[in-house]
């Protein structure tokens, strides 16, 4: 069944190529397609294109179909082109001619747009909640280990003292920046395109504000052409937000892999969270972090995929846009899984509390000792030269004392302030 059927048989090779794997992908849109249809027909009844009795039986039938979408039993049957066709087919099969009335005043163009906006809105809310969950895990670890020192590096060389509190806390605050991107993408998605039809509006007296309110959009895409242009723009905004989170996750995973290496030995994992080697009996590999790192590298390519797919498209709907689902849908799934696993693993990391007892880290304290001299009245350049010559001559003996008090340093992590920052950003997405 095709909604655009005009009495001729489409070539099967063309049909297979153009439909692609849309039937499988569209299953994720079924719930949103039904919710969009329910709002649309309520609006149609309000402008006289449906009788109240017709609306009632259509809503009842759609509620039954919605249950199948929510419990996972909804299917798109062989020969049915997409989710829109399947829903309309089920209604017509059950209700007869009244089922054919639901498409008045809309096109599959704005129908799939509203499905995708609803889908992305919900997915971004779920991603945001998982980012917040990982943030909480990192903050807990930051407080737990705030007094445990570890080496800090620049240029991969031993640099200055850091702490596990700083390390965990740094990734927590970085996630707050990522949350800004998620919130921005959410607000791009949270605009109603329904009523733009094929992209040029409708001669029916549609009440677009009504469907905006029914579907709880914060506003609408007012200009009907701009509404169609939002296909691709919504996915691009979401992809950049997901890539931002993936960048933070990937860097955290890389640190974990590095710090578990025996040459570092900063952290470890319970044996059951590692994997082994088929030939080396001693191996306990951080495969979960390696897979997170790899997946997050791929996720950072998603904005480029979206951009390249849409970069040279002219105004109006083009079938190329169908392929965006094949990019975005798997990406949301992978990012959610990575966030879940990262929170699981980070909460079980074991910290080595005696790293700095190793003499290889003596030079971490050179800056501390320079600053100590400066506080005693020695000019900075003279203090720097004095400690530098001790290092050069092999006579340097570290005091091994760290006294940091300013905001965001080892002794003042500002955990509460970072939490307040995150919660203020997060409220802009969960409050809707």
Image (tube, helix red, strand yellow):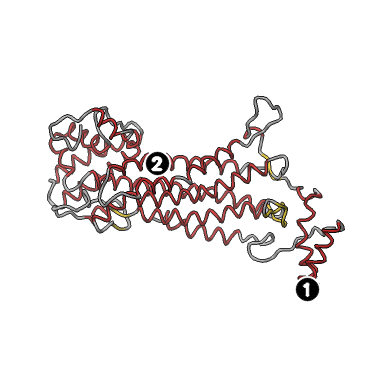
Quadrant in the picture for residue 25: top left
* Residue at the front extreme of this rendering: 312
Check disc 1 and report its element: helix, strand or loop. Answer: loop
Q: Quadrant of the N terminus?
A: top left
* Residue at the top extreme of this rendering: 278
Residue position marked by numbered label 1 in the rendering: 379
Q: Is residue 327 left or right of residue 19?
A: right
Image coordinates for residue 24, horizontal then vertical, percent? 34, 33
Q: How many marks?
A: 2
Residue position marked by numbered label 2 in the rendering: 327
User: Residue at left 67%, top 44%?
Assistant: 259
Q: Is residue 423 left or right of residue 273?
A: left
Q: Nearer the viewer, residue 330 or 16?
A: 16
Rendered position, 94 above or below 227? above
Q: Nearer the viewer, residue 112 or 42?
A: 112
Q: Is residue 358 left or right of residue 308?
A: right
User: Residue at left 61%, top 54%?
Assistant: 169
Image coordinates for residue 197, horizontal then vertical, percent? 21, 49
Image coordinates for residue 133, horizontal then vertical, percent? 52, 48
Categorize mark 1 by other alpha carbons within 10 Å: few (<14), some (14-19), many (20+).
few
- Please report whichever mark, 2 or 1, sits nearer to the chain's N-terminal start: 2
- Numbered tag placed on residue 54 in the rendering: none
The Cα atoms of the two marked residues, 2 and 1, are separated by: 59 Å
Quadrant in the picture for residue 91: top left
């Amino acid at each position: 069944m095709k909604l655009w059927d005009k009495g001729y048989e489409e070539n099967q090779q063309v049909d297979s190529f153009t439909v692609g794997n849309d039937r499988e992908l569209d299953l994720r849109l079924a719930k949103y397609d039904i919710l969009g249809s329910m709002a649309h027909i309520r609006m149609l009844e309000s402008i006289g294109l449906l009788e109240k009795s017709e609306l009632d039986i259509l809503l009842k039938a759609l509620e039954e179909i919605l249950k199948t979408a929510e419990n996972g039993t909804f299917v798109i049957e062989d020969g049915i082109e997409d989710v829109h066709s399947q829903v309309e087919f089920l209604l017509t099969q059950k209700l007869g001619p009244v089922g054919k009335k639901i498409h008045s005043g809309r096109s599959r163009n704005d129908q799939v747009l509203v499905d995708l906006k609803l889908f992305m809105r919900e997915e971004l809310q779920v991603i945001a909640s998982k980012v917040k969950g990982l943030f909480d895990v990192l903050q807990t670890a930051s407080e737990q280990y705030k007094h445990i020192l570890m080496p800090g590096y620049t240029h991969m060389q031993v640099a200055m003292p850091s702490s596990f509190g700083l390390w965990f806390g740094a990734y927590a605050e970085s996630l707050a920046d990522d949350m800004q991107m998620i919130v921005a993408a959410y607000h791009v998605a949270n605009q109603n395109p329904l009523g733009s039809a094929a992209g040029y509006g409708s001669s029916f007296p549609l009440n677009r504000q009504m469907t905006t309110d029914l579907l709880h959009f914060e506003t609408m895409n007012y200009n009907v052409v701009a509404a169609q242009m939002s296909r691709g723009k919504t996915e691009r905004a979401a992809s950049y937000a997901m890539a931002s989170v993936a960048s933070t996750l990937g860097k955290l995973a890389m640190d974990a892999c590095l710090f578990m290496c025996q040459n570092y030995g900063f952290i470890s994992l319970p044996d059951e969270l590692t994997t082994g080697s088929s030939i080396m009996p001693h191996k306990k590999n951080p495969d979960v972090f390696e897979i997170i790192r790899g997946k997050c590298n791929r996720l950072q390519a998603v904005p480029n995929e979206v951009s390249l797919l849409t970069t040279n498209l002219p105004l109006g709907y083009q079938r190329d846009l169908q392929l965006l689902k094949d990019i975005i849908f798997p990406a949301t799934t992978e990012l959610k899984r990575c966030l879940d696993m990262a929170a699981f693993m980070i909460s079980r990391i074991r910290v080595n509390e005696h790293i700095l007892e190793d003499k290889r880290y003596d030079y971490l304290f050179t800056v501390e000792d320079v600053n100590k001299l400066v506080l005693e009245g020695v000019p900075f350049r003279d203090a720097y030269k004095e400690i530098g010559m001790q290092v050069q001559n092999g006579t340097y003996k570290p005091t091994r004392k760290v006294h940091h008090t300013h905001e965001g340093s080892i002794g003042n992590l500002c955990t509460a302030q970072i939490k307040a920052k995150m919660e203020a950003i997060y409220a802009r997405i969960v409050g809707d």
